[in-house]
Image (cartoon, rainbow, N blue to C red):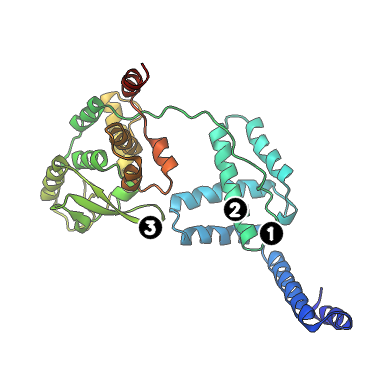
Amino acid sequence: MKKETLERVLTKASSFIGKSDIDRLRSVIEEELSREHKREGKSKEELLDSFLTAKKVEGCSWRTIKYYKYVIEAFLKEAASDLSTITTDDIRSYLNGMFDKGHVSNVSADNTRRILSSFFSWLTEEDYLQRNPMRRIHKIRAMKPVREAYSDEMVETIKTACSSARDLAIIELLSSTGMRVGELVRINRSDVDFEKREIVVLGKGNKQRRVYFDAKTKLHLLNYLASRIDDCDALFVSLFSPHNRLQISGVEILLRKIGKKTNLSKVHPHRFRRTLATKAIDKGMPVEQVQILLGHAKIDTTLHYAIVDQNNVRSSYHRYLE
């Protein structure tokens, strides 16, 4: 509706509607016209760029942004050119097609569902769409695999396999703090408080939190720093010149090599985090405190990370139920 047409309609309506009602009607129609103009103003690709920008502002990591882009672009290649015409059935058909193509787990399909839900929710909240076609599409159920923690023996085996003071300091810090590998590589020397044995790390969503390390980790960190001859601010750097800040991939490669060297399976940084959560809960640390320690937004995530020792379940059964 053009503005001139709107004015003619409102003028005619004023003969049988009061002025206050006319003003409210004008406001409603102008707001809807503004939304309609906004919806018609951007292509699918531009809307995706705007969505990813919003996610960056929210503090999502570049890896998350990259994954969002990959998933949504794959969907948009098969979607209608006009996003407003996409229906719930269209999205269900797309998700079902992922299974038909094979080699897609329920977990992967649900990750796609979750990302598309975030995209369409944003489009609706920003008034690019009038309705959200994802609203009635629910979580795809999947069997939860048993995610194992490291045993004490495995941790000691990994430490023994370290070939440098740096590598041992990394393992000790991951093991005693349960921090994310992305948090570890961002730490600077100045961030470490050796007197209090704590570090302020930058976690997901650019949220800061304190993590704590034990006396043994302190000694290994000091030993590693004493061996450094570079002036890089980073706590961990590459072993060879020019000694740049160590990246996530560097830590992952290190642990893969240790896994092959020791014949241990599933040796990766995140497993230290799961191990700490399991050990903390197993020894009676309140789950709310474990949640804070790990920097989880939801307590359900903390419970998902922790694995209750089956031996303790057995002993508790005999203690409380027999």
Q: Is residue 244 among the parts visible in the rendering?
A: no
Q: Is residue 184 left or right of residue 220?
A: right
Tell me the kind of residue under disc 1: Leu
Q: CA distance from mark 2 to mark 1?
A: 11 Å
Residue in the image at 26% along x and 25% along y: 262
* Mark 3 or mark 2, earlier in chain: 2
Name the residue beneath numbered marker 1: 129
Q: Is residue 122 left or right of residue 195?
A: right
Q: Give the image quarter of residue 308.
A: top left
Quarter of the rendering occupied by the C terminus: top left
Mark drawn on residue 316: none
Name the residue beneath numbered marker 2: 119
Across and down, in percent, residue 252 comes to 33, 39
Residue in the image at 28% along x and 33% along y: 279
Do residues under tags 2 and 1 come within 8 Å of each other at their CB atoms? Answer: no
* Mark 2 or mark 1, earlier in chain: 2
Tell me the kind of residue under disc 2: Phe
Q: CA distance from mark 3 to mark 2?
A: 21 Å
SS type, badge 3: helix
Quarter of the rendering occupied by the N terminus: bottom right
Tell me the kind of residue under disc 3: Asn
Q: Give the image quarter of residue 160.
A: top left
Q: Give the image quarter of residue 89.
A: top right
Mark 2, other Cα within 10 Å: few <14 / some 14–19 / many ≥20: many
SS type, badge 2: helix
Across and down, in percent, residue 288 comes to 35, 44
Across and down, in percent, residue 133 comes to 69, 49
* In-front residue for pair 311/94: 311
